[in-house]
Amino acid sequence: MTVEGDRLIHVWRCGHCRHAWPADEVTPPTRRSPSKTWLTNAEAIRSNSVVGRASVSTREGFTLIELLIVVAIIGIIAAIAVPGLLRARQSGNEASAIGSVRAINSAEATYAASCGGGGYAQSIADLALAPPMGVPFISPDLAGGQKSGYMIALGAPTANTQVLAAANTCNGAGANALAGYYVHAEPITVGSTGQRSFASDHTGTIYQLGTGAQIPNTMAGAQFLQ
């Protein structure tokens, strides 16, 4: 509204806003009676100017510098968190690989006692074969030879004397049961899915190698798993 001279006007205060109208006009109807203050035209103009600037300032967004700071902070957090997540993933995969080797050790002991006539199976596939009216010696998640970022397989053992012919095994194995077995597990991608490799044989001892390379059946260069 246009205000002339130094006529006194009403100023309606309502929270963060101020509305002014001439004193000789009727106050707009409201449910609650607003508080009124008498100001001169000059004071009203200055007050409305301040309110206008405050309203404009509340509509401003982030500045470019503020956005760059936020992006930099996110980058720093990611640089700290990602390596930790990768190490946690590797540790989980390695623990799973150790569990898989132990599961095969147990399966081989059961196979030798109940199916191989004292001899051991020579492949994952033979351990996955169920005898008549029985169940496989290993779980289905190991039957494929790959689990949690690791490749798991049976190789030629050092104790390779035949104990029982394949045709005479209880589950019709594809290979003869021998006096020993050799299992090894390596990460699919060294440094990503895992760092250490593992191996074991008919002695039941588990070995590890920090380079992730395959451990030979003699366990040469490998260390006992603590």
Image (cartoon, rainbow, N blue to C red):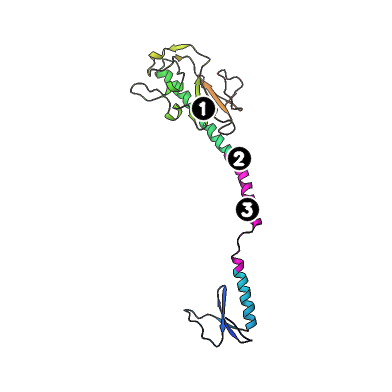
Q: Which image quarter is the C terminus in?
A: top right
Q: Label 3, secondary structure: give it.
A: helix
CA separation, marks 2 and 1? 23 Å
Provide the major secondary structure of the magenta segment: helix
Observer able to see residue 4: yes
Observer able to see residue 226: no
Query: Is 64 covered by the magenta stretch?
Result: yes
To which residue does mark 2 refer?
Answer: 83
Does residue 5 lie above or below 113 as drawn? Answer: below
Does residue 74 lie above or below 10 as drawn? Answer: above
Residue type of the residue flagged with mark 3 = Val
Q: Which residues are magenta?
A: 56-85
To which residue does mark 1 refer?
Answer: 151
Are the residues flagged by discs 2 and 1 in contact, CB closer than 8 Å?
no
Q: Residue at x 62, y 47 (%)?
A: 77
Query: 110 or 21, which lies in front?
Result: 21
Residue type of the residue flagged with mark 2 = Pro
Question: Is label 1 or label 3 in front?
Answer: 3
Q: Residue at x 63, y 75 (%)?
A: 49
To which residue does mark 3 refer?
Answer: 70
Mark 2 crowd level (few <14, some 14–19, many ≥20, 10 Å Cα): few
Q: Residue at x 45, y 27 (%)?
A: 144
Are the residues flagged by discs 1 and 3 in contact, CB closer than 8 Å?
no
Q: Quadrant of residue 198?
A: top right
Q: Earlier in the sequence, mark 2 or mark 1?
A: 2
* Residue 21, label in figure: none
x and y percent of residue 8 in the render? 60, 86
